[in-house]
Image (spheres, helix red, strand yellow):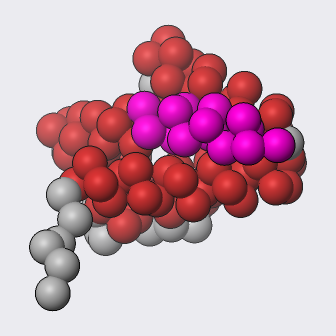
Amino acid sequence: MPEPMTMEQRRAHDAWQRAREGIERHGKEYVNDAKGLPALIMNSGLMQVMAFLHQKGGRHATLGAHLRRWLHERFPEVPEGFEPFMESLMKAEPREYQEITAEAFAWLRWLRQMAAARQGED
């Protein structure tokens, strides 16, 4: 029986799958958006960026949905749907909000790498 995956392996695996989906649906724009998302979150905050991605729609909404999906997997108490996700973050304790944001950055580091690697498959 194989050993359970480490958290880094789980992040990498999920990012690999989401990168495939994002690139299949939106091409290199998804890759570029994934690369820029950490800086956007650092400058504006997680909730503001999630609202922005949702409002923009299209490839941005896909990226936001991928991040929400991962955060829901890591923190089951955080809903995956946009509105309940936002409401959950609004009610989160500061420490919990920081943990969720830190996890978003950890996952996005993998998504950036995996999306760039998958883009090179073309």
Whether residue 52 sits left or right of residue 46 in the image: it is: right
| Placement of 117 over or under 5, stated as above or below | above
Instruction: Examine the image and state in which quarter residue 20 appears.
Output: bottom right
How far across and down, in percent of the image, does residue 92 sit?
Answer: 28, 49
Q: Quadrant of the N terminus?
A: bottom left
How far across and down, in percent of the image, does residue 37 sit?
Answer: 58, 27
Whether residue 117 sits left or right of residue 38 in the image: it is: right
User: Is residue 92 in view from this perspective?
Assistant: no
Whether residue 39 sits left or right of residue 33 in the image: it is: left
Instruction: Examine the image and state in which quarter residue 71 appears.
Output: bottom left
The structure residue drawn at horizontal position 26% and vertical position 48%, both measured from the top left corner, is 8
Q: Is residue 116 magenta?
A: yes
* Nearer to me, 71 or 122: 122
* Nearer to me, 29 or 70: 29
> How many numbered tags mark residues here?
0
Q: What is the magenta range?
A: 108-122
Q: Is residue 63 magenta?
A: no
User: Which secondary structure is most common in the magenta stretch?
Assistant: helix
| Placement of 43 over or under 31, stated as above or below | above
